[in-house]
Image (cartoon, rainbow, N blue to C red):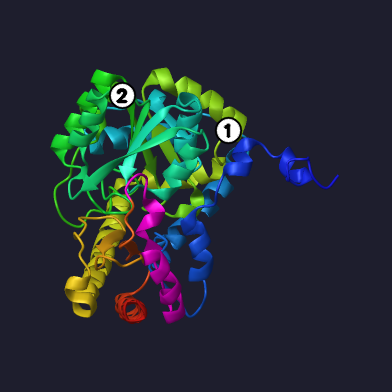
Amino acid sequence: MSSDGNGRSWWEALLSEEARTASSSAIRDLLRHAQRPDVISLAGGLPTPELFPIDDLRAATDRVLAERGRDVLQYGLTEGLTELRELAAARATATDGAPARPEQVLVTSGSQQGLDLVGRCLLDPGDVVVVDDPGYIGALQALRGRRPRLVGIPLDAEGMRTDVLAEHLADGLRPKLCYTNPTFQNPTGATLSVERRRHLAELAARYGFVIIDDDPYGALRYSGEWLPSPASFDAEHVVRLRSTSKVLVPGLRIGWVIGPEWLLDRLVIAKQAVDLHTSTLSQVLAHELLRDPTWLDAHVEQLRPWYRNQRDALLEALGDELGDRARTNPPDGGMFCWVELPEGTDTTALLTTALDCGVAFVPGGAFAIDRPCPDTARLSFATESPERLAEAVRRLRTALDRTTVTA
């Protein structure tokens, strides 16, 4: 059989609608180009491997395998390691401004799985989800698997425009979910103000939707004041996604969901169908490091000045090389700068020239929902050295000059 009569090959006819319509992440595709040895990548938000706690992980691995090898290599509870759930609840209570109990914690294979599970439990095809616009590509990819109607809410320097959301709600929009990165948003680096966090929680309670507070970068604050989670204003309508990828290492794939108990039971059942449980060994290793507050505080205090220096180096290079051709709001933390280039610039077209010049970035259009942003780009300062960041911006200037001349 060569086709099904509708112009599709026999194997395309076998695929589900989700598999046929799903698209790959633009960032994941771009990273293939960024792996070229001649390219300096400002694309992926990869933590710097120079600060991975390899020696501490090696010691922890040796210790737990020697002392509890049979247990840590066995199947585990779907909900996650009890002591890790207790630790996650205690950390959330201390850092989010909202109490959490271990019974509210589900350990996941990274926060991405947590988002997927929430979508599985709350969304039917056609349901409305409001999201940051521009928004995090990984979240959009996970949510689109449930075939919702995505509605973008614009951002400014203080994060999601909750006043715009309120207008949509007053006009009859009824979302089931609101997804946001409230702290050091990916891709813009913006932080949702405390007034808007409160307003968002009030809207969720009034109109009956769930807020997904996805905060992988909160520990990487370099300036500004700590802000509470939206859960501090209404925990029943907020699901918190947390991750160890940016503070420990991404390869462990350890994150967790903190949510109301009415949802947790359903998430556990959904996870049973997906992977039974998250790697026991990875959970134990994460717990071994995170349980020592002295070690953790010292480790985070290494990360913050490192990334602050990276951020400052990128901002300085943008000022030196591009001047007023590049407009950005310096982020208070995280791993990204959102850059607006001269009006009329097409950063998707610019990327081709940039790769020829030896630099990679993510065009802003890759993050767009309802508002095209063709003259924007996300630049990551997380991985490269200050010297390489400066060289990357010089190459970006060359690419922009060439594109301008061609135009």
* Residue found at x 76% / y 44%: 11
Q: Quadrant of residue 313?
A: bottom left
Crowding around mark 2 (Cα neighbors within 10 Å: few <14, some 14 to 19, many 20+) is: many
Q: Secondary structure at mark 2?
A: helix
Res. 77 visible in picture: no
Viewport quadrant of the N terminus? top right
* Amino acid on which the number 1 mark rests in the picture: Gly
Query: Do residues under tags 1 and 2 come within 8 Å of each other at their CB atoms?
Result: no
Q: Position of residue 141 (x, y in %)?
A: 48, 44
Q: Position of residue 375 (x, y in %)?
A: 30, 62
* Residue found at x 24% / y 33%: 165
* Residue found at x 24% / y 19%: 206
Q: Position of residue 12 (x, y in %)?
A: 72, 44
Q: Which residues are magenta?
A: 347-371
Left or right placement of residue 116 versus residue 4 in this view: left
* Magenta span includes 331: no
- Which residue has dot 1 on it? 76
Q: Earlier in the sequence, mark 1 or mark 2?
A: 1
- Please tell me which residue lies in front, 390 or 310: 390
- Please tell me which residue lies in front, 291 or 316: 316
In space, the residues marked 1 and 2 are separated at their CA atoms by 29 Å
* Residue found at x 20% / y 24%: 202
Select label 1 or label 2 by which is in front.
2
Viewport quadrant of the C terminus? bottom left
State the mark number for residue 237.
2
Left or right placement of residue 215 versus residue 166 in this view: right
Q: How many marks overall?
A: 2
* Amino acid on which the number 2 mark rests in the picture: His
Q: Is residue 23 above or below residue 257?
A: below
Res. 332 visible in picture: yes
